[in-house]
Image (cartoon, rainbow, N blue to C red):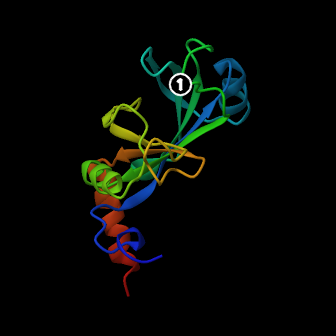
């Protein structure tokens, strides 16, 4: 691949995995696996009528690059978004400049899910890349819903330090 999509002029960087969101008809079965059996500690909850989601937020690891495991069930299984319809609902990626990423990728014809940039379950600004092209957009998440998450200053600093350490 060449041109802007290959990295030339990209006004943002993906810094790491922020979360993995898993949906099901009931959080209780998901909690039984992730919390009770695997021992991943819960750190919070989030409920949004607008997003049709009731979720428990778990965290693996420590520090700036800890990864959230979000266990999600729909508030109303008949409504959309259907957070339970695909068990691996979405993957969240830290980006260093969400506004720049949204503008640049949108300018390249990438389809975003409705809602634009907004506050997500973890309190960070987020937006979602739509899993399918269409509606006048040639590019998409190629079957995967991808959440772009504005990285915290700590994640940005840790990522910068890692790059400096790995530079010969």
| Depth order, front residue of 14/79 | 79
Left-right relation of 118 to 67 = left
Q: Which of 16 and 167 lies nearest the eye of the viewer?
A: 16
Left or right of 148: which side holds 160? left
Say few, some or many: other residues with alpha carbon within 10 Å of mark 1 (under 14 / 14 to 19 / 20 or more).
some
Viewport quadrant of the C terminus: bottom left
Residue at 59% x, 29% y: name it. Answer: 71
Which residue appears farthest toward the front when viewing the image?
136
* Residue 36, x across and y down, in percent: 70, 27
Q: Position of residue 139 (x, y in %)?
A: 47, 54
- Residue 15: x and y in percent read 40, 59
What SS does tag 1 mark? loop
For the image, the number of numbered tags is 1
The residue pinned by badge 1 equals 81
Closer to the camera in the image, 5 or 73: 5
Q: Residue at x 64, y 20 (%)?
A: 27
Residue displayed at 29% across by 57% down: 104
The answer to which image quadrant residue 119 occupies is: top left
Q: Give the image location of residue 49, x and y in percent.
A: 44, 14
Q: Is residue 36 left or right of residue 108?
A: right
């Amino acid at each position: 691949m060449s041109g802007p999509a290959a990295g030339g002029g990209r006004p943002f960087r993906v810094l790491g995995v922020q979360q993995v969101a898993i949906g099901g008809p009931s959080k209780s079965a998901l909690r039984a696996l992730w919390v009770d059996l695997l021992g991943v500690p819960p750190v919070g909850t989030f409920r949004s009528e607008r997003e049709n989601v009731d979720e428990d937020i778990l965290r693996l690891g420590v520090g700036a690059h800890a990864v959230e495991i979000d266990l999600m069930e729909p508030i109303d299984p008949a409504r959309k978004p259907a957070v339970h319809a695909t068990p691996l609902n979405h993957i969240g990626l830290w980006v260093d400049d969400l506004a720049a990423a949204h503008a640049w990728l949108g300018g390249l014809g990438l389809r975003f899910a409705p809602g634009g940039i907004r506050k997500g379950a973890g309190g960070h600004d987020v937006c979602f890349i739509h899993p399918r092209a269409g509606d006048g957009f040639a590019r998409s998440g190629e079957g995967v819903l991808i959440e772009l998450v504005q990285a915290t200053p700590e994640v940005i600093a840790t990522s910068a330090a890692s790059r400096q350490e790995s530079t010969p």
